[in-house]
Amino acid sequence: MMDRYKIPRTKELEFGGPLGAMILIFLMPATVFYLLLTCRTEQASVLNFPPPLPPLSTLWSPHTFLLLLAWVGLQAALYMLPMGKVTEGIVLRDKSRLQYRINAFQAMGVTALVVGAGLAAGLRLSYIYDHFLQLAFSALLLAFGLSFLLYFKSLFAPETTLAPGGNSGNPIYDFFMGHELNPRIGSFDLKYFCELRPGLLGWALVNMAMLVKETELRGSPSLAMLLVNAFQLLYVVDALWNEEAILTTMDIVHDGFGFMLTFGDLAWVPFIYSLQAYFLVNHPQKLSLPMAAGILLLNGVGYCIFRSANSQKNTFRRNPNDPRVTGLKTIPTATGRRLLVSGWWGFVRHPNYLGDLIMALAWSLPCGLTHVLPYFYVFYFTVLLIHREARDEHQCLRKYGLAWQEYCQRVPYRIFPYLY
Ligand code: NDP
């Protein structure tokens, strides 16, 4: 009976199959250390030969590792607290639905109180800046350790609970993509927990630590640092406020929980997304008020597009008869679901990615135009979203067939109007 719900072997491999996965398992951590080490140099130039990796004995610090574990432990404890509502995820292959606790926003509030109390008691937040490489190394070890445990656990998981995209039978590929879709310990959902809390809140905390360090060095935070902190904090708060929306994203619905997501959530987000703030500590930038106002406007435009496009689709998917979306034109599909073809989703096929990319540019501009390094996020994110868009289109074409083709005809541009 359960056999019909078994996840079939993954036939179409992504990221270049096992070889590509193997390369990425090394390339992703190497990129983190390359960027952090280059950012610490005086010139911070991507044209220079990469600085040598410090010896492992200086990267490994039991103290920072324990600190990282304490941070993740705090977030795990807050996730388990019976505050916030419980909601259901999408219907799974075996027709069941998992329950998720929605309390990331409250967890952020409690975290802010804990950090505030720590600061009042004399906690030096600039410790994070001073031990940044060690912390990144600890996060890398944690991501590897967790990925191995997850893969091991998945070998004993029922076949109905595996990830459609991470069941190739090749251990390297499945380790990277994630073999199990929603690994849980009791009701503790490991992927859902890691997606938003330790990494995203960690990113905001790292940014704040950079601001504190800059203040220690120069007496007051710079306008550039304040903008970077404010923009990125808005993004984090927005993600936590809209936590429920993550339940319909590709990461939760389609991708298994393997190295790609553990490393992304625990190491890449907090240590790479904070690169602009890290850069500004060592490379102060003068920002004129008109320039700051222009950047503020750009971020506002990006945020409005990002938020209203995401909200429009989420509202429509939750209740197509909601008065806020009933005026929009739609295309029926064979699945019974409809596709929006006016409003933001009639402008380009991924308006939310467009808004996200405009914000990415606004986060880097406060770092001036003299260095390429702080623009890494813009380049990387453009590649990531173009690739993600292609993956999503592929899945939508499979799901909706002719209706998706009609949508593509009526809305010809994917992300950038008249360009792409
Ligand atoms: P999206 O929110 O873009 O969702 C894609 C899905 O939306 C499709 O699979 C389809 O699913 C549905 N859809 C597509 N077109 C239409 C339409 N015309 N009408 C109705 N439904 C449609 O996916 P993501 O998870 O990639 O992105 C979510 C947000 O997260 C984005 O804003 C993105 O920028 C952001 N993001 C940020 C990252 C970061 O590191 N900062 C990383 C990745 C994403 P279905 O039909 O099944 O509902």
Image: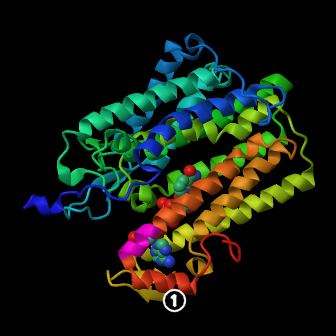
Amino acid of disc 1: Lys
Residue 223 visible (yes or no): yes
User: Image height check: is 398 above or below 259?
Assistant: below
The image shows residue 50, relative to residue 293, as above or below, that is above
Report the predominant secondary structure element of the magenta stretch. Answer: helix
SS at badge 1: loop
Q: Residue at x 41, y 38 (%)?
A: 78
Q: Nearer the viewer, residue 362 or 25?
A: 25
Residue 126 image-quadrant placement: top right
Rendered view: 409 above or below 396: below
Q: Position of residue 353 (x, y in %)?
A: 60, 63
| Residue on which disc 1 sits | 329
Q: Which of the two residues, 379 or 215, is positioned nearer the viewer here?
A: 379
In magenta, the rendered stretch is 394-399
Q: Position of residue 189 (x, y in %)?
A: 32, 44
The x, y position of residue 3, in whole percent, is 11, 59
Asked whether residue 396 is drawn in magenta, I would say yes
In this picture, is 55 found above or below 126? above
Residue 279 vs residue 78: left or right? right
